[in-house]
Amino acid sequence: MFLRHTLLGILNDQNPPAPEGEIPRSVAVRIPSRSAHAVVLTGVRRSGKSVLQAQMMRQVTATSAYCNLEDVRLFGFGPADFPAFISVLEERTPRGGALFLDEIQEVPDWQRLVRSLLDRGWNVCLTGSNASLLGGDLGAKLTGRHLSYEIFPFSYGETLTASGERPGAASFVDYLDHGGFPGYLRDRNPQVLQELLRDIVQRDIAVRHGVRETRHIMNLVLFLMANTGQAISLQSLTKALGIPTVAQTSRLSQYLQDAYLLFALPRYSPSFKKRVVAPNKYYAVDNGLRRAVSPHSTIDLGHRLENAVFLALRQRGEPVFHAGEKDLWECDFVTDREAIQACAELTPYNQEREIAGLLRARLLPGKLAKKRRLLLLTISQRDSLTIDGVTVDVRPAWEWLAEA
């Protein structure tokens, strides 16, 4: 157990990160500065959660406290220390103040601590890097008492703010190449992203889940990042990567998603059963990370564009699917409001295929069936096509992302 004076010394010694040139995050406008609910910021490591938390803290500096739970001096901190921790907090900061807890998943049974703090009138903001741990345990222990927000690496608009560049095809292609991890963008050393991937696999997957052999995890994440936007079944992944069982492939895939390295996109179907069994597509959390660890040396601008469009849709928070019938038609993204194809360049050779997918997706059941906007996003082209009385808008993806 930790002594009170030890906890007091650690809290007095800690300070939230405050790097130079920090960028305002677009998600911040949706996050309340004070709330009776626990505010939870989740996302991949090094995406800027702690800096965003520090920005929020500065709004309530006089009545706030901060604790980084990854501090090595807090190793072993657990439920037996909660009463002393709360006592020290109330000694330093009046009850009813704001408490910012960084990387909360490092503490066993942390939900009890958060529940106690909320019951005592504290405003609590948490960050964490594990979707399953935070999502499942929050739902079980803090039902109706939390507000969750996903934090991603910089969006295209945020990278423009950071770099001072103007929106346009050139800056957008640069964004597709390098992504938005703030730490990487400072000097663009790919080793930063390669080490980040290894750290996440080791700390957030292997250690947390007791996985002794990381070979299958690394093979799986590298394969899926190199093949974003392709529908891949668990059976084919198992066979291609030599993983012993489909169940193990499924489990490892979920670990990668829980660590926010990858996102699975299900195929659209009004039947829940068909939606579950159909192959998912997978997308990387960041194009820069994807490029830094990909074995492919060829330029795959179309796949990077598709990945960027998915991330923008994910950040909107509305349900999104891919759609299609094997060897007949395909639409990259379908929501209730839109059907979207991502195509680096529209040409006479691919125009019929791309538009056919949009027209078929328009007819899929949904709240706005037959009223979906049909959108074809390219690197720089702009046009408006009318097919059988139906309009397809062709727009530069950088323009669409800058508005997102």
Image (spheres, rainbow, N blue to C red):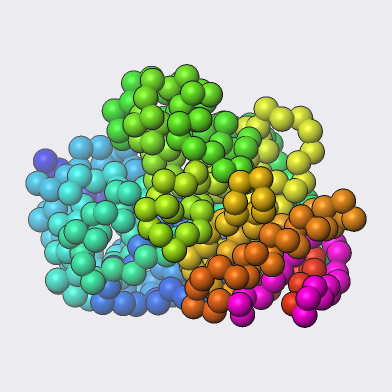
Quarter of the image for the C terminus: give it: bottom right
Q: Position of residue 100 (x, y in %)?
A: 33, 62
| Label total for image | 0
Quarter of the image for the N terminus: give it: top left
Q: Residue at x 38, y 58 (%)?
A: 272
Judged left or right of residue 104, residue 339 is right
Q: Pick whichever, 197 or 303, lies toward us.
A: 303
Is residue 356 among what the camera can see? yes
Q: Position of residue 298 (x, y in %)?
A: 79, 33
Judged left or right of residue 377, residue 222 is left
Q: Is residue 239 above or below residue 86?
A: above
Q: Position of residue 96 (x, y in %)?
A: 22, 76
Instruction: Please report the bounds of the magenta region as a residue range.
Output: 370-389
Is residue 157 among what the camera can see? no
Q: Is residue 6 above or below residue 239?
A: below
Q: Among all residues in the image, which is located at the extreme right?
A: 348
The stretch drawn in magenta includes residue 212: no
Q: Residue at x 51, y 71 (%)?
A: 365
